[in-house]
Image (tube, helix red, strand yellow):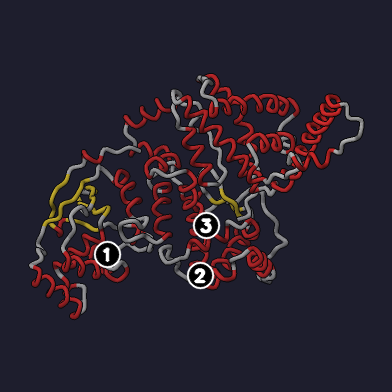
Amino acid sequence: MYIDYSTWETFEYTLNSLSLDLNNPRIKYKGVALNQTQIMKFLIENEKVYELAKKISEEGYFVGEEPIICIENNKKVVLEGNRRTAALKLLQDPKKYLSNAKTNTLLQNIIKNNFPVDRKLRCYISPNRLFANPIIYERHQGNTLEKWQTGNQYAFVAEMYYEDGLNIEDICDVLNESRAKILKPLKAYNLFLEGQEVLQKKEEIKLDISNFEITNLERFYNYEEARKLIGIDFNNENGELIIYLPREEFEKRLLVVFKLLLDSDRFSRDFNKDDDKKLFIENLKKNPDLNFNIFEDLSKIESKSTTKKTDLEQEKNKITTRRQKQSKKRLYENIIIPREKEIIFDNEKLDSLFNELKNLPIDKIYSFAVLLRTYLEQSLYFYIKQNNLSDRLNSKTNQENEKNGLKKVELLINHLKDKYKIKENIESTPIIGILKFNANKEFSNASLKIMLDYVKNNELDDHLDSNQLKNLKFYIDNIKNGLDLAVHNIETIVDLSHNKRAWSHLEPLFDILSNNIQNDN
């Protein structure tokens, strides 16, 4: 999403007039509402605000670090820069928050460096929270400012979906991220909510997302057998949790898992290599408190995140301007792949490629052809790799190579015998070796044609009826050859009809590939 930040106004405000943000991701997900004094104390205790205040009093307040605020309910709320603002507030009244020793340290620095504690603070004024989100998200990934914990980062994205009412495409647009990078935190956040509630309800353990090792949770559910054990999967369109077990049994299993996850170091050791993971799941299945005679309920149980979801379109209308809507409408009419079309491989690069391909305007004719060929080749490679088909592909490919090589050698032998009147038999095997027609090719070096031929002839039969299959196989080679020419031949001219025809015939293939990926890790 393009934002003209140069239009944002700046103004100098007294520190007392600025309110620290209750919705600051550092604070909000602690689960308690705090007043301004409590926020200050929290930031001092948990977010190194004293250390920052000490640094500022020693080295000065750097230019280029102006906070971003917005006006909410007649209050000037600091959206970005809460730690810096809190540090400056602390320097105004250190006795209110600090021990004598720390207070004296700050006061000595203030006197020594003649630090202006009554200074006004220049701030940028954002039209609303949404427009400040790209800056906040980018800064706190750890490049320039104090990095948020992974859980805080994930919760920040989830809030945009569940509370601000944005859909996935909007969040990708606002944060300039791929769909895969947005779905990843939503999946983890949704399962975390379930675990957080069950720990509180069953064990009276309060789980804080900012202190929870959420990457361990991701490692757990990315393992297919682990997902099966707790009876879950995820909706790849929006990251929402799908529960296939009766809720009582689901919560029992989830409780056991989350109690193990609390000891993050031990879990990291125990759930490491593939053999460790298998043993981990086997041990869980021996738990007498769990009932493994209960099978998956295909009717699906509603998750907490699903019940929490608000009406996205209604919320979106509150923050989307008419100009943006018109712009999106024009974009919709000016693209080959419909905006609502989704193909998800759950692979960051492939999903980013598709997102870029989908958003290419109609007039980017050569860009579309080149990117479509790239997407075709890499999606085939990913499908074969993830489904452990490389050995089978190698075997079939090498058999075909040997067969074709033998035909060429026999043709050569017949030519030599005829031309030089040779009556003796000539063995084909040494010639095959010399010409290296018997050299085996590895899957990693397989060409687009080899991969496409293999998938076309071995992987499509169960997914299409005979007429669809015949049609797809007929067009696939023509489309592939056309894309090859577009990429490799300077004389080849591409027009819009080529691109539309290529997409319409390849779309069923991409759907089959993406819907039949085996993802065990």
Nearer to us in this view, 335 or 448: 448
Residue 326: which disc? Answer: none
Residue at image mark 3: 191
Q: Secondary structure at mark 3?
A: helix
Residue, x 36% and y 27% (percent of image)?
326
Q: Is residue 231 above or below residue 101?
A: above
Residue, x 77% and y 36% (percent of image)?
405
Q: Secondary structure at mark 2?
A: helix
373 sits left or right of 109 in the view: right
Residue, x 56% and y 71% (percent of image)?
269
Image x and y of residue 213, in percent? 47, 65
Type of amino acid under label 3: Leu
Type of amino acid under label 2: Ser
Q: Which of the marked residues, 2 or 1, is nearer the chain's N terminus? A: 1
29 sits left or right of 191 in the view: left
Nearer the observer, disc 2 or disc 3?
A: 2
Q: Which of the marked residues, 3 or 1, is nearer the chain's N terminus? A: 1
Q: Is residue 281 above or below residue 189?
A: below
Type of amino acid under label 1: Ile
Image x and y of residue 114, in percent? 7, 67
- Residue 396 visible within the image: no
Nearer the observer, disc 2 or disc 1?
A: 2
Q: Is residue 258 above or below residue 185?
A: below
Please, which residue is most extreme toward the front here? 420
Q: Quadrant of the C terminus?
A: bottom right
Residue at image mark 2: 264
Spatial CA span between label 2 and label 3? 17 Å
- Residue 188 visible within the image: yes
Residue at image mark 1: 39
* Residues marked 2 and 1 touching at CB (< 8 Å): no
